[in-house]
Amino acid sequence: MKERHMMGKIGDLHVTADRSAAGGFLLLWAVFSLLGRGLYHLRPRAAITGGLLATGLHFLSELWHQMGHARAAEHTGFPMTGIHLWGMLGTSIYPPDEPELPDELHIERALGGPRASAGLALAAMLVAFIVRPVGRTALMVASLFALDNLFIFSAGALLPLPFLETDGAIIQRYRQAYRKRMVVIQE
Ligand SMILES: [Zn+2]
């Protein structure tokens, strides 16, 4: 198993990270700072500060997304044990000795994250609208926060990608299994 550094706890959830998360943080900081320069026309210092804030909010958004999974998991009676951060993203951790669960429970747990992120995206859009007159740095941070939650943590998470275990991939897999079972029952 890959190295897991203990970062802390949120309620009963252990938050761990591997070294790639530090790389992910720095890379995202650079990308957001460049967006601050190119898209929001900020001075270098403001772009770098805005980039740092937007990166911090990205990782908070990831934790918020995972808390959505955790709430849904709690609701199914098969809770998460932790959150593992790697690169720019994170993974929900479940007990290794879980029994085989019904497909619907997997789907319910997978939907919890994007649902929570969609709510946060709406709130962030409202904040971006409110802080618009404050200045371009505030607008940059708030709008990146909103777009991140909308396109990465809600819509993006629901995309079934072949190279990444997204929430969408999990939902698609268990939906197919569920349909197959229904066909067998009907035959
Ligand atoms: Zn998720």
Image (spheres, helix red, strand yellow):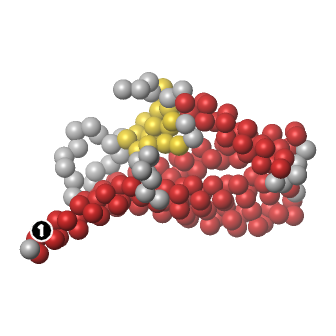
Determine the residue positioned at 78% across, 54% down. 140
| 117 over 100 or under it: above or below | below
Identify the amino acid type marked 1.
Val
Compare residues 79 and 183 and report the one nearer the observer: 183
Q: Quadrant of the C terminus?
A: bottom left
Task: Name the quadrant containing residue 88.
Answer: top right
Residue 42 location (% of width, % of height): 88, 48
Q: Quadrant of the N terminus?
A: top left
Q: Is residue 13 left or right of residue 48?
A: left
Q: Is residue 150 left or right of residue 166?
A: right
Q: Is residue 147 left or right of residue 140?
A: left
Q: Badge 1: few (under 14), some or many (20 or more) residues near its Cα, within 10 Å?
A: few
Q: Is mark 1 within 8 Å of ligand 1?
A: no
Determine the residue positioned at 23% across, 43% down. 98
Determine the residue positioned at 53% across, 62% down. 155
Residue 136 location (% of width, % of height): 86, 55
| 104 over 70 or under it: above or below | below
| 84 over 3 or under it: above or below | below
Determine the residue positioned at 83% across, 50% down. 38
Q: Is residue 132 visible?
A: yes
Compare residues 160 and 146 and report the one nearer the observer: 160
Q: Is residue 104 visible?
A: no
Task: Name the quadrant containing residue 83.
Answer: top left
Q: Which residue is mark 1?
A: 184
Residue projecting furthest to the right: 43
